[in-house]
Amino acid sequence: MAKKALVTGILGQDGPYLAQHLLSQGYKVYGMIRRYSNPNFENLEYLNLMNEIEYVDGDLTDEASLMGAIKFIRPDEVYNLAAQSFVGGSWEQAKLTTEVNALGVLHLLNAIKYFAPTSRFYQASTSEMFGLGLNKHDGMQDEGTPFHPRSPYGVSKVYAYWMTVNYRESYKMFAANGILFNHESPIRGIQFVTRKISDGVARIKLGFAKELHLGNMDSMRDWGFAGDYVKAMHLMLQQDEPDDYVVATGENHSVREYAELAFKHVGLNWKDYVKTDPRFQRPAEVPNLKGNSEKARKKLGWEPTVSFPDLVAMMVDADLKRVEKRNR
Ligand code: NAP
Ligand code: G4F
């Protein structure tokens, strides 16, 4: 019989890529959707998956809805990708961010504990938890680096991380944290800096915009391709023992470098179009993320396959097509 996987956050960026991977491995995939007046299936449509998923209703803030879903599906694997995932918005909506990202995970762990205790659980943890934390030896972050989150989002994810560890230790649940560094794709949310730039470059190149306003351009991120990263999530749940893993490329670049490459890809100079704008500065910044994913590489056999320049080109090309189509 096909294995059953429940994916929360199915309409986001990672949900569709993970669903695509699980379907290719023969899984039956259930996708959780929260109540919305007008749900947006664009990302699933982009990968042509809309009709491949069985949808279930649920909201991480509503524990009973999660219990209902888990009881109905009794999944072999649960991937918790749902979150208020925008760091920049987490100061304005700190309580909501906490309710979804922290307490929501407790709700889901309880639902699994009561109704599917042998189900394997993946928690979408994040490099934002490290914040200012650096590994003393190489200035990178790995599984042993202390957490020093810098945003309500980062703080909420630290709670979820430790609850996942605690349920593993307390109830012997198969619960794993993937500590993923930034990963992007053509279906990345438009607010995140890589997609904001690729969309801005496409609109400028095609004559629909004149400038692009950005915040801190010195910020350094370790950017990989989402399609690679979801494979690590799946591998974590196929191991004999549950554990926590950093997933990263090991290379980082500044926002400025990303913008430079993206504009160059269409034959433009970023300096002619980018304006720095204090509205996009954060109250506290994470200046430098670079992950050491040696453990995932050794134990899971995971490797990233898309280079930084190829990722930038992939995103700009996709937005050029999108902007052209929208305005045709
Ligand atoms: P995303 O595109 O923002 O998707 C998040 C999804 O969560 C959306 O589909 C959203 O639903 C859903 N959601 C939000 N609140 C919910 C609630 N109360 N109940 C149920 N669903 C809810 O995020 P992503 O980039 O795919 O990231 C997936 C996960 O990995 C997130 O937990 C994120 O924090 C974490 N993460 C991401 C990265 C990265 O670089 N992408 C790195 C590390 C960790 P709607 O579509 O209805 O809004
Ligand atoms: O693209 P960002 O908004 O991503 P951020 O804050 O790194 O968070 C993402 O990655 C995390 C993993 O490390 C995930 F957990 C999280 O859910 C999310 O997916 O910002 C990246 C950097 C920041 O330093 C920000 O200050 O870009 C800088 N930046 C500069 N100008 C900007 C802008 N960010 C945004 N969103 N918009 C700007 O105009």
Image (tube, helix red, strand yellow):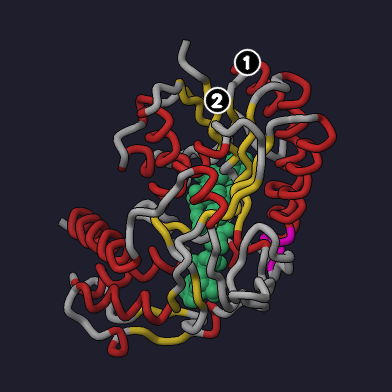
Q: In this view, does 3 lie above or below 94?
A: above
Q: Which of 65 and 121 is in front in this view?
A: 121
Image disc number at residue 21 = none
The residue to which callout 1 is attached is 72
**Residue 24 point in image, percent of width and height:** 35, 29
How many numbered discs? Answer: 2
* In this view, the mark in front (2 or 1): 1
Q: Is residue 111 visible?
A: yes
Whether the residues at callouts 2 and 1 have beta carbons within 8 Å, the answer is yes
| CA distance for labels 2 and 1 | 9 Å
Residue 47 located left or right of residue 223: left
Residue at x-position 38% and y-position 44%: 43
**Residue at coordinates 19% horizontally, 73% vertically from top-left?**
266
Q: In this view, does 9 lie above or below 262?
A: above
Mark 2: amino acid = Val
Front in this rendered view, residue 238 or 278: 238
Residue furthest out toward the right: 170
Read off the magenta span. Answer: 151-155
Q: Where is residue 98 in the image (x, y as percent from the top left)?
A: 74, 53
